[in-house]
Every structure is written in C-alpha cells, then in structure tokens.
Amino acid sequence: MKRQKKIAIYGKGGIGKSTTVANIAAAYSEDDKKVMVIGCDPKSDTTRTLCGKRIPTIVNTLKDNKAPELSDLVFEGFNQIKCVESGGPEPGVGCAGRGVIVAMKRLENLNAFDEEFDVILYDVLGDVVCGGFSVPLREDYADEVFIVSSGEYMSLYAANNISKGIKKLKGNLGGIICNCKGIENEEEIVSSFAEKIETQVIGVIGRSNLIQRSELDAKTVVEYAPDSDEAEAYRKLASDIFINDNFSTPEPMEDEDFENFFKSFLD
C-alpha cells in the first residue's frame, strides 16, 4: 500500500476546525487525491458540507446494528470523498471521547484503512486530556498534527493545552492554522504564539461571510464558490500542509507564562 498522509486537525470547539477539514479535503479531491475524512467530534458535523447533510454516526448505527458492514459506516461525499462520523453519547450522558475509541476500532476491524487513500483527515475536538480524543495520536492513526486557532485568548489557551498533549504523546506538530476572527493584531499574535511554542503558522484563513453562506447551503466553499478568494485560500492551505516537512515537538507555555504572553499584546 502506498504511503498515506494521515493528518489530525485539533482545536477548541467552535474555532472552525470542521470547516477547515472539510474544505481542505475538498481541495485535495479536486487534485485527484483519494481522501477519507473522519469526524471525531461528538457534534458529528464535520462531513455535513461534504455530503450535503448529516450522515449516520458509528455510535448510533451500532445501537441498532451490532454487525454493520463498512458501507453502513462510510459514506461518499463531494468528489468521492469517503466520510465517517464517530458520534458520541447524548449530551450529559457518558464520555464523548469513548465514541472515538469505538469508531476507530470498528473501522479497523472492517479494514477501512486498507484502501489506498492519499490523505486521511481526522477532525478532533481540542481536549487531548481525554483518552478518546487522544486516540488518533496515541494509537498512531495520525502521523502529523495541526492546530486551528484564532488570535483570541481562549482559542490560544486551548491551543497551548493541546500542545501539552501533543508533547506528552510525542506527536509531530506541523503548525498552527490561523482561522481569523477579525481581532486587532490577530496574525501577529498567532505568529508570536507559534514561535513561542516552537512551531510555525502553516496558513491563514481570513474571516468571511461567504464561508458562512456556503455552510448554510451545506457545502464547502470550495464547492459553493470555487472561483472565490476563500476557495483559493483553502487550496493553498491544503497544498502547504501536504508538502510540509517542518515538524516539531512543541514546547508549550506554562499557564502563567501564557497569561503574560497574551497580556503583552494588550499593553
């Protein structure tokens, strides 16, 4: 089997990692790459814009079908991208990360990874302290990691915590994806943060209403507005991630150092 690029995208909830994953997957598919996208977020919405709707999750499927076939769990989306959602328990009931563990083992048992994909993308909720959400790294499903963050305090705080998990698991961090929210000095803040934890900014996605409109239409911006600047930005990001060979074990900041770092931009 040819070598696959196995990429995990982490980030705090709501930061735009699912949008990022779906759009770079679409960009890869345009380049005739065989792509699989695995949503490891209990919201189960990673693949909605690739399939045009929400697809059944592995966790929910297993409730009614104890012996599913691969076709019950893997669905085809835009440009033949293979789409999977791990799913999770009802809010407030059980461990959300456990859905990831169940999903990955089931996919492995059904030989889902035997197909010759060029790229496998994992969209992972930014809480690697949870055993379930650390699975893509801990179990070697993913070879490289990128973190989506804006220049906001809580987003970078989460990115710093994710970096602690990546360091503990000896993961290969490829960089920070700056998903802009339009705050002052945003790119400078994210670039300085990346330098502090000894990584790079691999790409910048500007704030755009077009991206939101495409999501309301259940499409990626690459499909919805293929000639737009936004689609080109995702294509460039996808390309830069694919050819990147600059990886590091991050050196995250202690909480007090992070506080001082962020406050320095408010003075």
Image (spheres, grey):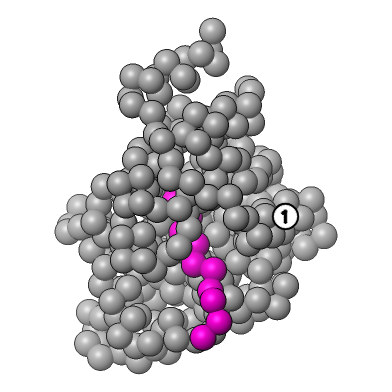
Left or right, 114 with respect to 97, comes to: right
* Relative horizontal placement of residue 65, taking residue 43 as reference (left or right): left
From what the image shows, is residue 90 above or below residue 30? above
Front-lying residue, 148 or 245? 245
218 vs 191, nearest the viewer: 191
Residue at the image position 45 percent from the left and 63 percent from the top: 143
Q: Quadrant of the C terminus?
A: top right
Residue 103 shows in the view: yes
Tell which of 96 and 260 is nearer to you.
260
Can you identify the residue that label 1 sits on? 236
Relative side of 145 to 61, left or right? right
Q: How far across and down, in percent of the image, does residue 188 sit?
A: 63, 26
Residue stretch in magenta:
1-10
Name the residue at 39% across, 41% down.
163
Q: Residue at x 49, y 81 (%)?
A: 75
Task: Check disc 1 and report its element: helix, strand or loop.
Answer: helix
Residue 246: say if magenta.
no
As drawn, 149 above or below 89: above
Circle 1: residue type: Lys
Residue 190 image-quadrant placement: top right
Residue at 35% x, 80% y: name it: 107
Please tell me whether residue 64 is drawn above or below residue 172 in the rendered image: below
The percent position of residue 244, horizontal first and vertical second, equals: 62, 55
Q: At which x and y percent is residue 125?
A: 38, 52
Q: Check disc 1: other Cα within 10 Å, few if <14, some if 14-19, many if 20+.
A: some
Given residues 62 and 172, the one toward you in this image is: 172
Check the image and name the residue furthest to the left.
94
